[in-house]
Image (tube, rainbow, N blue to C red):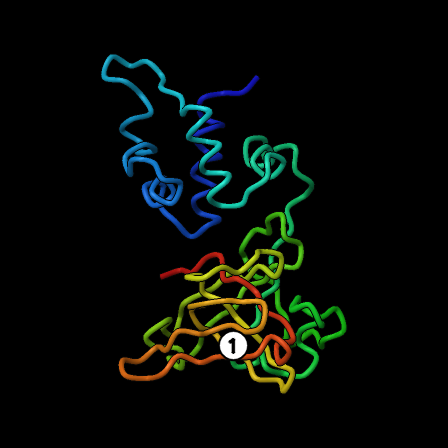
Amino acid sequence: MLTHDQIWSAIDALAVRQGLTASALARKAGLDPTTFNKSKRVTADGRLRWPSTESVAKCLAATETSIEDFVALLLPESEPPRRFLPVIDLAQAGTNGAFDENGAPSANSSDHIWLDSDVPAFTDEAAYVLDLSSDDLLPLYRAGERLIVSPAAVPRAGDKIILKTLSGTLHVAELSHITDTSVTLKATHAGAADHVIDMDDILWMSRIVWASQ
């Protein structure tokens, strides 16, 4: 039987997966920002308040989450034994052989490059953690932050991404524009020009789905 705690916990888990607060998830879905506030989950007289089917459906559509994925969040006890995401430092991410041709951690890379993190895996089995040990990505990210990258998530304009070119260059940036022939990476510093990369020059591009900012 589905419980009140289960469905609210699943909505909270969906927000965390997207790197959002419950209020930000509601806004992303086109709902009132207070829709998922904890204060609204129980009425003043103690009755349980459930989210509407429409609000849940809008959240799934806005986050491109399938019903199957949401059910897994509803019933975590039905999931297989928990797997943890592999982790690599950005300074080592450019090492030859660290990634496969799809941008997933390479099974053939040496053990000292990819380590075990304490971050639980989710539905994208190719997802991984990127640790930042320097301030090279300021003002986008700073040293000490941790990013979760999903090769299966489809990048859209406005998303933060990691991209590798055929020449081996890694870019971590905000995706400003994407077409069938090119992507435009937003400049991180005022006065700098956006960076346009031809699709033919891209080996792979993955979406950053969460950051510990």
Towards the viewer: 36 or 196: 196
Q: How many marks?
A: 1
Q: Residue at x 71, y 72 (%)?
A: 101
Residue type marked 1: Leu
Residue 44 occupies quadrant: top left
Of all residues shown, which one is farthest toward the right? Answer: 108
Q: Residue at 76%, 73% (x, y): give it.
A: 108
Mark 1 secondary-structure assignment = helix
- Residue 183 screen position, x and y as percent: 51, 72
Residues 176 and 130: in front is 176
Going by the picture, which residue comes out furthest to the left?
A: 44
In-image side of 117 versus 104 (left or right): left
Q: Is residue 50 above or below residue 105?
A: above
Determine the residue positioned at 42% across, 30% down: 55
Quadrant housing residue 169: bottom right
Residue 127: image location, x then y, percent: 61, 59
The crowd level at tag 1 (other Cα within 10 Å; few <14, some 14-19, many 20+) is: many
Q: Residue furthest front?
A: 180
Q: Above or below — where is 129 with respect to 19?
A: below
Where's residue 42, x and y in %?
A: 31, 21
Does residue 108 appear left or right of residue 128 in this picture?
A: right
Location of the C terminus by quadrant is bottom left
Q: Quadrant of residue 116?
A: bottom right
Which residue was labeled with disc 1?
90
Residue at image coords 27%, 35%: 34
Quadrant in which the N terminus appears: top right
Provide residue 154's location: percent of width, then percent of height: 57, 57
